[in-house]
Amino acid sequence: MNSETQFQDAKKLLGQLIACPSLSREEEGTATIIEDFFKSKSIPTKRLHNNVWATNLLFDASKPTILLNSHHDTVKANASWTLDPFSAIEKDGKLIGLGSNDAGASLVCLISTFCHFYEAQLPFNLVIAATGEEEISGANGIESLLNSSEFPEISWAIIGEPTDCQLAIAEKGLMVIDAVSKGKSGHAAREEGINAIDLAIEDISKIHAFKFPEISDLLGPVKTTVTVINAGKQHNVIPEVCEFSIDCRVNECYTLEEVLETLQKLVKAELKPRSLRLKPSKIDSDHPIVQAAEKLGIQTFGSPTLSDQALLHCPSVKIGPGHSGRSHTADEYILLDELKQGIQTYQTLIKQLNS
């Protein structure tokens, strides 16, 4: 199949995905579209929840297995859209629509790459997984595949996300902490009680002032930001409880547990993480995919944004067509030239790994 046919197939598939609403946990339609695409190529697939996956024709369990993964769920279109988010409008060299940039373009380019190498004799296996629930880090997304006995063991992974086709070799993890400061209620007009708001302010000031000493060359420092606070119900009652939330973006120098422990020692509030699943990651500089990218002149960087990389337990990189800053924005689009670049980049990387 020549490059123009691959591009046209990818563009058509992306248009179909855009036209089918696929909010997280509501990806049934796009999962079926992806299944039908593979069926048209005579490639058998399996499906778990709304995750569709397939292995290369010459799959050999004795070889290492590379996962090609991106997601087909989207966020909700915001009120600033001026065009129909589900019309897949082609205009001025762009394909406009919800999920076009994040991460439909990466997904269809990975699918195109998998199809291109489906029958090839390679020193490794390829597994393509089009997954759901990425935008909410849901349990029925890629995590359910990795926990399935049917899914092959993965040696390492390429995650498709908009990175301007640069290679993210590290990614910050995310931990949201719910904090509770406890005081003692009393009448606001009298000198009684312990104001939980005051206690929370003291802790928040400490969090704001504290700097984690280990700074990553790729990801920079750990970033902790108080983003939500709530206390009090009556103007004349000293509040005995103040609740606040801390958004923690964690570099690869620390585990989430270490960050939690450090913050708990710093403050008086009781800290409880919502999850310890979304871990930071970094791949070794001598890994074959990093070496292949360097030989091809592909720039490497550390990514501050979260993806399904956080749920993997194997080495991984993140790369794909499109620009991260367009994600979740009104009138989201992918340039058609970026779509072509995505197919070429993925296929060139696989070829370099096979050389």
Image: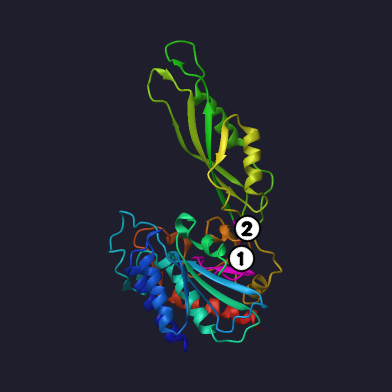
Of the image marks 1 and 2, the number of the one nearer the N terminus:
2
Does any portion of residue 89 appear in the rendered image?
A: yes
- For the point 40% across and 61% down, the residue is 74
In the displayed structure, does residue 102 sit left or right of residue 199? left
Q: Position of residue 130 (x, y in %)?
A: 47, 69
Does any portion of residue 94 appear in the rendered image?
A: no
- For the point 51% across and 68% down, the residue is 160
- For the point 60% across and 82% down, the residue is 351
Amino acid marked by disc 2: Ser
- The residue closer to the viewer here, 187 or 341, is 187
Identify residue for label 2.
281
Q: Helix, strand or loop at disc 2?
A: strand
Q: CA distance from mark 1 to mark 2?
A: 8 Å
Identify residue for label 1.
316
Q: Position of residue 343 (x, y in %)?
A: 49, 78
* Residue projecting furthest to the right: 286
Let me know if residue 341 is in the magenta part: no
Q: Residues within 10 Å of mark 1 (few under 14, many from 20)?
A: many
The C terminus sits in image quarter:
bottom right
Check the image and report above or below for 56 versus 177.
below
Q: Quadrant of residue 89?
A: bottom left
Disc sitting over residue 116 in the figure: none
Colouring style: rainbow
| Total numbered labels placed on residues in the image | 2
Q: Position of residue 182 (x, y in %)?
A: 53, 26
- The residue closer to the viewer here, 102 or 26, is 26
Q: Residues within 10 Å of mark 2 (few under 14, many from 20)?
A: many
Q: Helix, strand or loop at disc 1?
A: strand
Where are the magenta residues, as a range? Answer: 151-171
Amino acid marked by disc 1: Ser
Q: Position of residue 48 (x, y in %)?
A: 47, 67
Check the image and report above or below for 173 versus 36.
above
